[in-house]
């Protein structure tokens, strides 16, 4: 018998979708993401985070870079949306 999929009302898509199978961080933000972000929404973030890391050339070993990425994550899901880096051109327009 298959276990029913967990669903959440995704803050990114504004509709019920399949929830994540794990909590991404062991803290309040991780719990908030687990409760409010769909698996599909998380995939969008992973792609967006790659762009941020590359455009800003973040060294993820540095605490400042980790904090910046975390701030962008929170804005992406719960704020006005993560700001694109100055001068960013989407790959399809380069």
Image (spheres, rainbow, N blue to C red):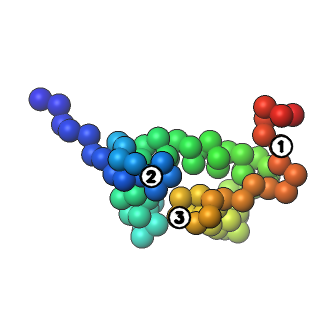
Residue lying farthest to the left in this orientation: 1
Q: Nearer the viewer, residue 3 or 62?
A: 3
The mark that comes first in sequence, 2 or 3, is: 2
Q: Is residue 32 visible?
A: yes
Secondary structure beneath dot 2 equals loop
Residue at the image point whose x is 85% and y is 57% from the top: 86
Mark nearer the viewer, 1 or 2: 2
- At x 37%, y 43%, the residue is 17
Q: Residues within 10 Å of mark 2 (few under 14, many from 20)?
A: few
Do callouts 1 and 2 mark residues in contact (Cβ within 8 Å)?
no
Q: Is residue 44 above or below residue 86?
A: above
Quarter of the image that includes the C terminus: top right
Q: CA distance from mark 1 to mark 3?
A: 24 Å
Query: Label 1: which residue?
Result: 89
Mark 2 to mark 3: distance in Å? 12 Å
Residue 73: x, y in percent?
58, 59
Mark 1: secondary structure: loop
Q: Measuring from the top left, give residue 80's x and y in whole percent.
A: 62, 64
Foreground residue among 63 and 86: 86
Residue 54 point in image, percent of width and height: 76, 47
Q: Classify mark 1: residues with Cα within 10 Å, few (<14), some (14-19) or many (20+).
A: few
Asked if residue 92 lies left or right of residue 29, the reply is right
- Of label 1 and label 3, which has the lower sequence position? 3
The residue lying toward the viewer, choosing from 64 and 70, is: 70
Name which of mark 1 and mark 2 comes first in the sequence.
Answer: 2
User: Which of the 4 image quadrants contains residue 69?
Assistant: bottom right
State how far apart marks 1 and 2 are (Cα).
Answer: 27 Å
Disc number placed over residue 78 in the picture, else none: 3
Residue 37 appearing in the image: no
User: Considering the image in quadrants, where does the N terminus appear?
Assistant: top left
What residue would you read off at disc 2? 14
């Amino acid at each position: 018998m298959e276990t029913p999929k967990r669903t959440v009302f995704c803050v990114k898509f504004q509709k019920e979708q399949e929830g994540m199978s794990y909590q991404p961080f062991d803290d309040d933000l991780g719990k908030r993401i687990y409760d409010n972000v769909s698996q599909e929404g998380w995939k969008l973030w992973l792609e967006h985070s790659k762009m941020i890391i590359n455009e800003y050339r973040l060294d993820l070993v540095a605490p400042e870079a980790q904090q910046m990425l975390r701030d962008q994550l929170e804005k992406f899901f719960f704020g006005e949306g993560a700001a694109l880096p100055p001068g960013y051109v989407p790959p399809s327009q380069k």
